[in-house]
């Protein structure tokens, strides 16, 4: 499977990239972003694009992709709705529209957020914009579109959020993480389980289009049970 990742320098994207590089079913990974990940691997090809709204120069790298993991996103804190819409909705739909024309047979997986408002009429700005983005993606002629709505994500394997406030929250949460996973098994994810779940959805499919934290944990758990010992596990 050839996988394209947008946003591979962020916390979620780095988790997805790690799982792709470890997974034997993934033969090639192409990352697209404004900055390189700084990683090196025989399966990895990094492409830096100053303008993600115009990907035509990267068509040779994007052709033949089986799946796109779209992990690109920003926090809405301090942003106007117009500015947040340009990044979250307009850019996402521009990239997805280009990929749908180039490779309509691919699976497109969009990392959205828990609480996204599919009605587009709610009071919470970011949830409305995410909802409008999800609805737009559903209209594109991909083979399948999965909308991933994770809740709290615990970073593992040295991965960190680029947002200072989030890093502080994760540091405070770390001692409580084992208890929270026991008490609220469907409320939290790790970067590892999220990456695995997206790969399962891309390669084998998922039971529904909108995947919440509990659904993602179940997909990741099923993938772990299917994998032979020592194969596809973190190194």
Image (cartoon, helix red, strand yellow):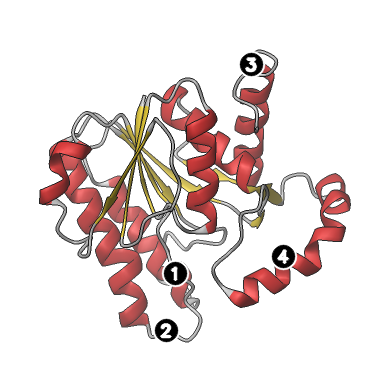
Q: Position of residue 173 (x, y in %)?
A: 79, 64
Residue located farthest toward the top when viewing the structure as drawn: 228
> Can residue 207 be seen in this snapshot?
no
Circle 1 is placed at which residue position?
A: 74
Q: Residue at the location (85% across, 49% down)?
A: 178
Which tag, 1 or 3, sits closer to the chain's start?
1
Given contact means CB atoms under 8 Å apart, are the residues at marks 4 and 1 in contact?
Answer: no
Determine whether 115 is above or below 138 in the image. Answer: below
Name the residue that disc number 4 marks: 170
Query: From mark 4 to mark 2, how far is it between C-alphas?
Result: 23 Å
Specify which label sits upstream in the sequence, 1 or 2. Answer: 1
Residue 183 locus on image (x, y percent): 86, 49
Distance, label 1 to label 2, CA atoms, is 10 Å
| Residue 45 percent across, percent down from the top left | 32, 40
Residue beneath label 3, please? 226
The residue pinned by badge 2 equals 79
């Amino acid at each position: 499977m050839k996988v394209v990742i947008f946003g591979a320098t962020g916390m979620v994207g780095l988790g997805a990239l790690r799982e792709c590089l470890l997974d034997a079913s993934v033969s090639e990974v192409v990352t697209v972003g404004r900055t390189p990940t700084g990683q090196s691997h025989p399966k990895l090809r990094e492409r830096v694009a100053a303008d993600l709204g115009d990907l035509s120069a990267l068509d040779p790298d994007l052709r033949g992709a089986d799946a796109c993991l779209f992990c690109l996103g920003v926090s809405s804190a301090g942003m106007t709705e117009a500015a947040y819409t340009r990044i979250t909705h307009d850019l996402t739909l521009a990239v997805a529209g280009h990929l749908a024309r180039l490779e309509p047979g691919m699976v497109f997986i969009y990392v959205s957020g828990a609480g996204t408002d599919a009605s587009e009429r709610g009071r919470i700005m970011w949830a409305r914009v995410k909802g409008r983005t999800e609805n737009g993606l559903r209209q594109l002629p991909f083979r399948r579109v999965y909308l991933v709505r994770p809740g709290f994500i615990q970073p593992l394997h040295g991965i960190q959020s680029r947002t200072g406030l989030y890093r502080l929250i994760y540091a405070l949460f770390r001692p409580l993480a084992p208890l929270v996973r026991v008490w609220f098994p469907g409320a939290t994810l790790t970067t590892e389980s999220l990456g695995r779940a997206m790969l399962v959805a891309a390669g084998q499919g998922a039971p529904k289009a909108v995947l919440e934290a509990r659904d993602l944990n179940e997909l990741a758990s099923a993938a772990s049970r299917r994998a032979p010992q020592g194969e596809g596990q973190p190194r």
